[in-house]
Structures are given as structure tokens and as C-alpha cells.
Amino acid sequence: MTQTRRLAAILAADVAGYSRLMGADEEGTLAALKAIRRELGDPKVKEHRGRIVKTTGDGLLIEFASVVDAVRCAVEVQEGMAERNAEVPQEKRIEFRIGINLGDIIRDGRDIFGDGVNIAARLEALAEPGGICVSQVVHGQVRDKLDLAFEDTGEQQVKNIARPVHVWRVRLGIKPAVSASVPLALPDKPSIAVLPFQNLSSDPEQEYFTDGMVEEITTALSRFPSLFVIARNSSFAYKGRAIDVRQVARELGVRYTLEGSVRKAGSRVRITGQLIDTASGAHIWAERFDGSLDDIFDLQDQVASSVAGAIEPRLRLAESDRARRKPTGSLDAHNLYMRAEAEGYKRTRESLAEAVRLLYRALELDPEYSLAMARIGSWRVYQRSRGWIPPAGPQVEEAIRLARQALAAGRDDPRVLEMAGAALAWLANECETGLAAIDQAIALNPNLALAFSHRALLLNKLGRFEEAIVAAERAIRLSPQDPAAYVSYQALAIAHLAVGRYEEGLPWADRAIRNNAGAVALQLKLSLLGHLGRLDEARECLRLLREINPAPKITPASRSGWGSAAPAAPVIEGLRLAGVPEA
């Protein structure tokens, strides 16, 4: 059998206290382990593109092409096990210890060998039950790409490994602090961030309802042209954290924050809100709103209007005739839409499929629900970009049809215009139509960050690079902590590359890589490095790209693919200069 050597991420896992568990209940333990593999372990490994190399009685060895996938898989498995064990007595719990390393391995048939494997096994032994330990190289690769906190345990001398191993422990259940940065300057008009509200309902499943309520209030506030409103994605970076409002003010560049809670019981809803001046920490407004689900849209508008009035009283008169438009007459359809949003923001293959399914259910209840139609189009764009649906076929054709229908019906809703316009631009290649819709969305809502992101990408495609830079920078300012900011970072890297400003484009490509770790961002960086003649760095970038695509090549398909998002010629030329081979 031929042996091959290559770089891989290795995950080693074993069952803590396996002998004790087997001694107490052999049949029950084996049955439980099989159920865990079938219901949790194997699906997660498949989802994150891993390969189970071998199993022992109490252990697993798994290989991944991407170290990010390996760590994500480990975290989701351990979180899943914690949920399964929540009501199991301590002495009967099955808990895994996991170690992850990135290193050189030798593949012999289906088996793998080498120090890369051995170190993963030693890291596993250092992990606590239910815990994960990773090597220094793994930590360096994922620390800026995953929303995880780590504990540095220093160098450890481990069995049969000559050199000490620097070990990091993943701190499960703890979010990393939002990185300190230079405070953003305050805009020239009142600025506000609507922070995630507390769900005070007895049912934790109602979290989606609370998040959806916050998103609707954010959207309502965004329609006030005299306000500067931070996008939902950046505000939700603080979900689940106890954060000083002064820190939020520095990191988002806002004067005010809105905090609150939602309690839903039966058909009744109570929304409480408090507006805080971040400069002084003073509460300048607080109010409680009670109503029924039948009045939910009016309640949302009351909160938005009251906040705007507290910030700048003249806005009450200036916006007194603002239309209080309900997005749908069906509250059940709206509820399904909010559930779909909660699923979609998880950004996994399964969650996006579930989001689309929920949106179709909403359309069954209200066939004229233009927001649901447009959102199906936008999620299909994301699914296709990830290769989760075919590039053409019934799903794409149906999304295009719904986007056209949404655009015709929802011309006064900026969210509909932005999502439907982007869907037509990227799925149907109707760039001018898409750009016109997105520009109309911005005219209606100048705080819509994602519209500026899509505008930047479309302007790049149309060759209007300087305008693209302005649009991308505006998107970043409106949503400085956005997990989806890589779209704007990539747009900036593309625009600077296209006009030959390679040094200026490089930091944006790096930020896109840290934010998303996708192949597109790596290829952009590789092209920029090729143009700059920095070939040593290009080789390292190419090595990282091969973790995602083992054999990257310049092909006719790649040329046409780049033409859909960027000027193909300079990107391809940079890749060629960086050493990417022709097909």
C-alpha cells in the first residue's frame, strides 16, 4: 500500500472513566455510546467534512482537511454532550476528552501515523472530561476565526514526545471579550445601538421571538433619517455578555444604547426598554409597553417612536406621518419568519435549509408576504456561494421568481429591496436591476449596513471601484462588529487590487480571512502577494488555501467565477505570479 505524507488536523477523543462505566453497566454503556455516535458524533463529523480514521473501545481518531472544521466539530460535540448529560446522574454520564493538533501525518491505506497524530493523543489525555485541549499551532490558526475563549496552560512535557508541547484549553461556554480597539468617532447625528433584549418568558424556545422583536425595533429606528443606527449583526455580537455600556460606545461608536426585555405569556406581550447615555451611564428614558400579539407591530413602533423622541424630540414632528405598515397580516406567518431568522443567522448548512423551509411555511399562510419571498432569495445566494445547493436548477429558478415578485410588491420596504435586489444580481446576473433596488433601499433606510455591502460588491463587478470603496467603508462603520463584515472586507480588497493598490488591499484581505476563513479571501490575499512579489508569504498563504482546496488551480471555471464578483484578469494574474498552477 502506498504511503503519502501531508498536513492535516487530527482530533483524538476518548471516553473519560470508560473502564468504570463498563464495569458498572457494560450493555447500557455500549448502547449509549452507539446512540451518541449515531445521533451526535457521526453527523457532526460529516457536517464538518471530517473522516473517522479508526475507533477503539473508548476512543476515536478523526482527520480533517481544515483545522477550523476540526475545532468547530469538537466544540459542537462537547456542547451536545453537555445537553445530553444535563439530567443524567454524575456517575452515569458519558463524557469525552478531546485533543486537536495540526501537523504532518503519514497516510497508509485508511490509517494515519506520525507526530501529528501522537501529539493529538497526548493533548486528549491532558483534557478534562467534557473538555478540549489544542496545540499552539491550532490556537494560532483559529483564535481570530472562531468565537471562542482559550486558556493558556503553558508548555507541557508529554510521553514519547521529545519537545514540550504548548497547550491551550478551550473555555467552553465562555465568549471571548470583544477586542479592544481605537474608539470610533461619533457620527454627526444621534447614534444608537439596540442591544439584545432579555427573554423573560418561561419558555427558552421563545429566544427567537425576543431576538426578532429586537431586530424589528432596530429596523423601525433605522427608518429615521436623522438617526445613525448600528446594524443588528454588530449589536448581537454582545448577546449573552455582561458588557459595560462605555465599552459598547467605544467599540461601536455610539452615544446611546437601548436595552430591555421581552416577556411573552400566551397572547400577551410586555416589552420594557431603557435608553442609556453612554457618556455618563445615565438612564435618560425607561418605559413599559403591554399589549396583545394582535398589536405586536404597533408595540414595536411605539418603542421605536418613544426612543427617537427621547433622543431628539423634534423627530416626533418630523416623522409624525410615518406609515405604520405591517409586513404581513398573518401573525403566524410573522412568527415563522422570526424563527427562520434565528435559524438563518446560525449560518450552517442544516440551519439554512431549516430557515428556507420555515419561510415557505410562512408563504403558505400569507402568499403575499414579500419579506419572506425576498429572504428566501438572499439565503439561496448564501447557500449557493457555499456549494450547499446546485449553481443552477429549480431552487435557484424559484428563488429568482420569488425575488421578482417581492420586488414588485415590496417597493416601500428597504429590507425587501435589499434582499430581492441582491438575489437578482447574484442569482440571475441582473446587476443593474439589483443595484437600482439596493440604492432605493438605502434611500429609504440610510442605516442598512448590508445594503451598502452588497452595493460595494456590485459596484466592483461593474468596474466602479472607487465608489465600491466608499460603500464598503460605510457598511463597516454602520456595523463595526458584524460577523458578516468579511463581505465588505473582501469588497475593499477587490477594489484596491483592481486599481493596482496592492499594499492597501492586503490588510483588508487579512481581515476577511480572520473574519470568515474562506477560500475567496485566501485567493485574494494570494493574488495581492503575487502582484507584490512577496513569494515567501504567498507560499504560506497557498498552504492555508490547500487546507480548504487540496489542489488549487487556475481553470476556465475559476476565471468565469472571478468575473462574477471581481475583475477576473488582475486576480488571475496575481494568482499566476504567486505560483498557482494552470489546469
Image (cartoon, grey):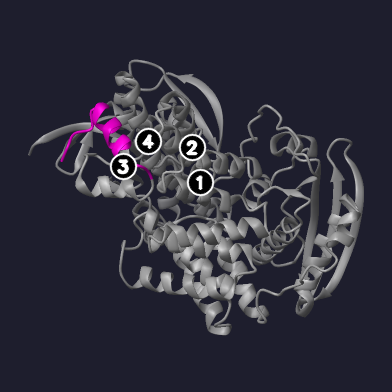
Secondary structure state at the residue bearing disc 2: helix
Residue 508: % across, % down: 48, 32
- Which mark is on residue 358? none
* Rendered position, 157 above or below 235: above
| Mark closest to the chain's N terminus, 4 or 2 | 2
In terms of depth relative to the viewer, which is nearer, 12 or 257?
A: 257
Q: Which residue is mark 4?
A: 524
Q: Residues within 10 Å of mark 3 (few under 14, many from 20)?
A: some
Q: Which residue occupies 49% across, 55% down?
A: 347
Amino acid carrying label 4: it is Leu
Q: Pointers 2 and 3 in contact (CB under 8 A)?
A: no
Q: Nearer the viewer, mark 4 or mark 2?
A: 2
What kind of residue is marked 3?
A: Ala
In the image, taking residue 551 as reference, residue 158 lies left or right, namely: right
The residue under the point 62% across, 67% down is 338
Q: Residues within 10 Å of mark 4 (few under 14, many from 20)?
A: many
| Residue highlighted by disc 2 | 492
User: Residue at 39% across / 22% down in the picture?
Assistant: 158
